[in-house]
Image: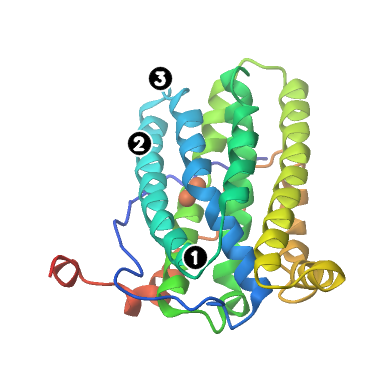
Amino acid sequence: MAKATPADLTIVPRDLRFGRGTQMRRWWLNDDPFATAFYNALSVTFPKGEGFFVDSVRNFREGTPPRLHGEIQAFIKQEVIHTREHVAFNRHVTDQGYDVTLLDQRIDAALALTKGRPPIASLAATMALEHFTAMLAHQLIANPRHLAGADEQAAALWRWHSSEEIEHKGVAYDTWLHATRDWPRRRRWTVKSLVMLGTTLKFFAGRYTGMLELLRQDGITGARAHRGILWYALGRPGMARKILGAWIAFFLPGFHPWNHDDRNLIALAESDYAAAIQPRAALAA
Ligand SMILES: [Fe+2]
Ligand SMILES: [Fe+2]
């Protein structure tokens, strides 16, 4: 039996800023070009990607029950602040000499494909990608190895973002459940599963090519680049390998993102990044 979003969950946007007035080293994550390339490539997708999530969910806000309506509002606020912070983070990336034009063009091309498609298709893609971000966020907080040796501000940004992704992981899913409430179960499952398969392929292909491009700019090409990416994803720290179980769970009957209650990780992340938060007064100075 599927569980639902916990009744006592409140989604609270934490309006924080990271890495202002600081410099980030080129290989900011443990001096590892592969690890750095993964997070850089991912971050480059966020401003436009999260804008797409926001629009896709907002399209279905009308007519939702009051609680979900409020959660959608909070989800939108969180994603908008994430975007602001990743724009700042991406500036650090380009300040280190990376040219992200090609990565940006690929995002534009991917988003152009969604234009003219029915809004429910965009909501389904968002629902699948939000499960993706929740899986990554869970790993990132639960396993300290992912951010070991990272620039302090960058690590804080990723932990903060991850904690909010966990907190709002049910919103796109609940919106999807509401929007498709009249669909027969079988159709719902088929669409959801096909969208997840397509989204997964695109996600991995997109990050893979993004990493290859950034690594090329580091002078790492050919077999060395491919080997390094595959080892990073499947070996150590093995993000792709570690999310496999949560990925499979998505296809099982009765799936709901909150079947797995990992709220403890929100508090853990908050205590991990607490020291790195820049007080507002200092920012204004
Ligand atoms: Fe986000
Ligand atoms: Fe999100």
Q: Is residue 197 left or right of residue 214?
A: right
Q: Is residue 209 left or right of residue 89?
A: right
Q: Identify the image quadrant of residue 114.
A: top right
Q: Say whether marks 1 and 2 touch (CB < 8 Å).
A: no
Q: Is residue 146 left or right of residue 191?
A: left
Identify the amino acid type marked 1.
Val
Disc on the earlier residue, 1 or 3: 3
What mark, if any, has residue 136 been given in the picture? none
Q: Could you tell me which quadrant the N terminus lies in?
A: top right
**Disc 1: which residue:** 93
The secondary structure type at the circle numbered 1 is: helix
Q: Could you tell me which quadrant the C terminus lies in?
A: bottom left
Callout 1: few (<14), some (14-19), or many (20+) C-alpha neighbours within 10 Å? many
**Disc 3: which residue:** 62
The secondary structure type at the circle numbered 3 is: loop
User: Could you tell me which residue is drawn at 74 percent across and 72 percent down?
Assistant: 220
Determine the CA span between mark 2 and mark 3. Answer: 11 Å
Determine the CA span between mark 1 and mark 2. Answer: 30 Å
Residue 253 visible in the snapshot: no
The secondary structure type at the circle numbered 2 is: helix
Name the residue nearer the viewer: 150 or 8: 150
Callout 2: few (<14), some (14-19), or many (20+) C-alpha neighbours within 10 Å? some
What mark, if any, has residue 73 been given in the picture? 2
Q: Nearer the viewer, mark 1 or mark 3?
A: 1
Identify the amino acid type marked 2.
Gln
Q: Identify the image quadrant of residue 119.
A: top right
User: Could you tell me which residue is drawn at 33 percent across and 80 percent down?
Assistant: 275
Disc on the earlier residue, 2 or 3: 3
Q: Is residue 107 above or below residue 121?
A: below
Q: Which x, y percent locates residue 41?
A: 60, 58
